[in-house]
Image: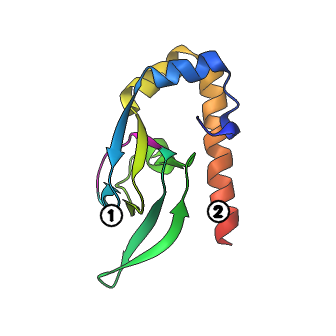
């Protein structure tokens, strides 16, 4: 269920899921709002969503997110406000990975921490490459 880029084994995935919760969002419901201070990671378990940014008081679609997409990795790594809106374009099941609990797990388990930060780095680099 977690993106393959993390290369977690079954036991590691289970540890992360133990600190996670599941939320459901209906079509056209906002999953994230720009400006929020939430640092939790979100994973689209099922469904699709879009990323929108506000430009001159208009919302502009900048990306479409599919099942398996991780959301919020930049905000996890640096404490900034959410920079975009994420809206479900079909019913979505979202896995929320609690920021504080994940930090505790990463401190306690260096193998998971190494895989996690390597995976986040790969995701961010791919997103940058796709915008060039």
**Could you say whether the residue bearing mark 1 is in a helix, strand or loop?**
loop
**Could you say whether the residue bearing mark 2 is in a helix, strand or loop?**
helix
Q: Residue at x 54, y 19 (%)?
A: 14
Q: Residues within 10 Å of mark 2 (few under 14, many from 20)?
A: few
Is 55 in front, or is 52?
52
Q: In the displayed image of the protein, which residue is found farthest to the bottom?
A: 56
Q: Residue at x 61, y 36 (%)?
A: 117
Q: Position of residue 104 (x, y in %)?
A: 44, 20
Point out the image quarter for the C terminus: bottom right
- Residue 110 makes an appearance in the image: no
Q: Which residues make up the magenta segment?
A: 36-44
Residue on which the image places disc 1: 28
**Is 41 on the left or on the right of 121, as rendered?**
left
Is 97 in front, or is 81?
97
Q: Position of residue 90 (x, y in %)?
A: 42, 59
Figure check: 81 above or below 109: below
Q: Quadrant of residue 131?
A: bottom right
Figure check: 3 above or below 104: below
**Is 20 on the left or on the right of 58, as rendered?**
right
User: How many numbered dots are placed on residues in this image?
Assistant: 2
Residue on which the image places disc 2: 128
Point out the image quarter for the N terminus: top right
Is 6 in front, or is 118?
6
Is 121 in front, or is 95?
95
Q: Which mark is residue 54?
A: none
Figure check: 40 above or below 55: above
- CA gap, disc 2 and disc 1: 27 Å
Q: Position of residue 27 (x, y in %)?
A: 35, 60
> Does 126 appear in magenta?
no
**Is 9 on the left or on the right of 56, as rendered?**
right
Q: Residue at x 33, y 50 (%)?
A: 25
């Amino acid at each position: 269920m977690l993106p393959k880029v993390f290369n977690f084994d079954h036991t590691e995935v289970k540890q992360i899921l133990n600190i996670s919760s599941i939320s459901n969002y209906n079509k056209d419901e906002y999953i994230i709002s720009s400006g929020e201070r939430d640092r939790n990671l979100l994973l689209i378990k099922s469904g699709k969503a879009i990323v929108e940014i506000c430009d001159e008081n208009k919302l502009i679609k900048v990306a479409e997110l599919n099942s398996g997409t991780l959301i919020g990795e930049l905000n996890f790594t640096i404490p900034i406000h959410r920079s975009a809106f994420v809206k479900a374009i079909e019913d979505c099941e979202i896995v929320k990975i609690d920021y504080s609990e994940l930090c505790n797990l990463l401190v306690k388990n260096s193998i998971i921490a190494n895989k996690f930060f390597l995976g986040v780095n790969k995701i961010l680099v791919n997103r940058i490459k796709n915008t060039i």
